[in-house]
Amino acid sequence: MENAAYKEVYDRGVQALQSAGVADAGLDARLLLEFVCHTDRNTLYAHADMPVSDYARELYEQLIRRRAQRIPLQHLLGTQEFMGLSFVVNEHVLIPRQDTECLVEEAMICTMDGDRVLDLCTGSGCILLSIMCYKNGIEGVGTDISNEALQVARLNAERLEKPALFVNCDLFGQLPEEPFDIIVSNPPYIRSDVIETLAPEVKDHEPRGALDGGSDGLVFYKRILKDAPRYIRRGGTVLLEIGYDQGEAVSSMMKEAGFDNVETVKDLAGNDRVVKGIWVK
């Protein structure tokens, strides 16, 4: 296969991923080839006969084998786009998903320039850093129980040149009780017994601690809403990402915790995705 043509290399990659049961075999094979060859999507159509060097082909085949083992594409590429920004990701953080953009968009509606924003379970930092990129003068704090995740968050803050403070603690931990204007979180919310039914890319390669929300999927919401009143200013907003079937439960919990104007927001697919409420006491 020496000096194989670009499309020939691509086709072999597609076949290998299809045989492994990868759902988006064509897309993933193309993105990996573009990553290796430093090309773009037009190359496949405009320069299908372009020769691929032995080195690039061998590297591509290695990546295809790893993707066939169901290692997430984003881990192989090292980045994931979110809110129009590029974030470093690895096996220590949850891969940013389009669904979570709904949380960021809702948070930005509530956030004013100069606000103090707290992001619980920050992971890669994508939520907090996106808000800081699109609002001015935000004082951003992110917490996570995983030191490895915080290393990724700090790297992303450095790449985006945003002065976020990332603290290693369990949710609020020992944070000073200085009120925030906005508290956001995409906490673990998948029921423990559901995790093994998820795609191999998720259950085998993403951090279990970022997925497992306990037997009912609601453990973290209970903990967040119990302590949030001590950390949110009067008139401030708490916004929580939820699973598609958790809107009623989390809304009720938020109301019971003393929040007003509690609202459930749907994502682009029409599923309940965010519950938000205002602290007015």
Image: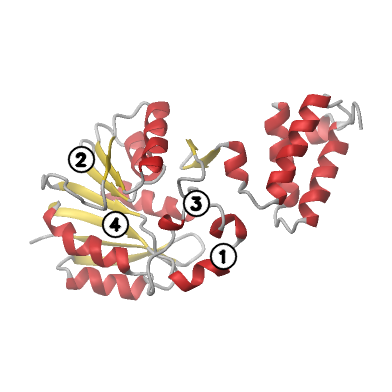
Residue 148 lies, in percent from the top left, at: 40, 41
Q: Quadrant of residue 276?
A: bottom left
Q: Amino acid at mark 2?
A: Asp
Q: Earlier in the sequence, mark 3 or mark 1?
A: 3
Q: Which mark is residue 198?
A: 1
Check if mark 1's residue and mark 4's residue have beta carbons within 8 Å: no
Q: Nearer the viewer, residue 258 or 45?
A: 258
Q: Position of residue 259 (x, y in %)?
A: 17, 65
Residue that carries the numbered disc 4 in the rendered image: 239
How many numbered circles does the render carry? 4
Asked whether residue 125 appears in the rendered view, the answer is no
- Between the C-alphas of marks 4 and 3, the distance is 17 Å
Question: What residue would you read off at disc 3?
Answer: 97
Q: Nearer the viewer, mark 1 or mark 4?
A: 1
Frontmost of labels 1 and 2 is 1
Q: Does dot 2 land on a helix, a strand or a loop?
A: loop
**Mark 3 secondary-structure assignment:** loop
Q: Nearer the viewer, mark 3 or mark 1?
A: 1
- The residue under label 2 is 115
Question: In the depicted view, which residue is nearer to us: 86 or 74?
Answer: 74
Neighbours of disc 1 within 10 Å: few (<14), some (14-19), many (20+)? few
Answer with mark 4 or mark 2, whichever residue precedes in sequence.
Answer: 2
Please name whichever residue, 114 or 168, is drawn nearer the observer in this view of the structure: 168
Q: What's the distance in space between the residues labelled 4 and 2, CA to CA? A: 15 Å
Q: Is residue 30 visible?
A: yes
Q: Amino acid at mark 1?
A: Leu
Local packing at callout 2 (Cα closer than 10 Å; few below 14, some 14-19, many 20+) is some
Marked residue nearer the N-terminal end (4 or 3): 3
- Examine the rendered structure and indicate whether residue 121 appears above or below residue 260: above
